[in-house]
Image: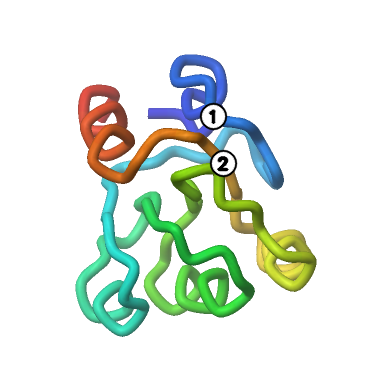
Amino acid sequence: MKITDLHDQLGYRTINLPDPDTRITDGYTSDLLSDVIANAPDGGVLITIQAHKNTIAVCGLAGLRAVVLCNDREPDEGMREAARSDGVAVFVTPKNQFRVSAEISKLL
């Protein structure tokens, strides 16, 4: 799926979108960042409530291309800056992680 599908088809609010042509090939749902580092698939999207800059650093280590923050979690300024600097897309939705995981899996 294209990364823009997260906004265009699912209605998630875009915080950062460095490259609209980015392809998402998988997803991973977790709030434990060490778990994300160990198990998240390269080229995927992280579904989480962790709205801070360490989440972006973990995306870089794991090869993730985007983050969807659930439950209307707003990224702090440190996360926004890190996402811009590292080229990681960030989206926000009021939906919970279960719903978001189900929605994204249907698009993959």
Element assignment for label 2: strand
User: The N terminus is located in which quarter?
Assistant: top left
Q: Earlier in the sequence, mark 1 or mark 2?
A: 1
Image spot of residue 51 (x, y percent): 57, 64
Image spot of residue 79 (x, y percent): 68, 67
Element assignment for label 1: loop
Q: Mark 1 points at which residue?
A: 12
Drawn side of residue 25 relative to residue 13, left or right: left
Image spot of residue 83 (x, y percent): 68, 62
Q: Which residue is drawn at 56% across and 51% down?
A: 73
Between marks 1 and 2, how big is the CA–CA gap? 6 Å
Asked if labels 2 and 1 touch by Cβ distance under 8 angstroms, the answer is yes
Drawn side of residue 81 relative to residue 45, left or right: right
Which sits in the foreground, 53 or 44? 53
Q: How crowded is mark 1: few (under 14 residues within 10 Å), some or many (20 or more)?
A: many
Image spot of residue 94 (x, y percent): 49, 35
Q: Mark 2 points at which residue?
A: 92
Q: Residues within 10 Å of mark 2 (few under 14, many from 20)?
A: many
Q: Which residue is drawn at 51% across and 71% down?
A: 55
Residue 56 badge: none
- Taking 22 as reference, is 37 above or below it? below
Which sits in the foreground, 94 or 46? 94
User: The C terminus is located in which quarter?
Assistant: top left
Which sits in the foreground, 37 or 32? 32
Q: Quadrant of residue 23?
A: top left
> How are the residues colored?
rainbow
What's the residue type where badge 1 is placed? Tyr
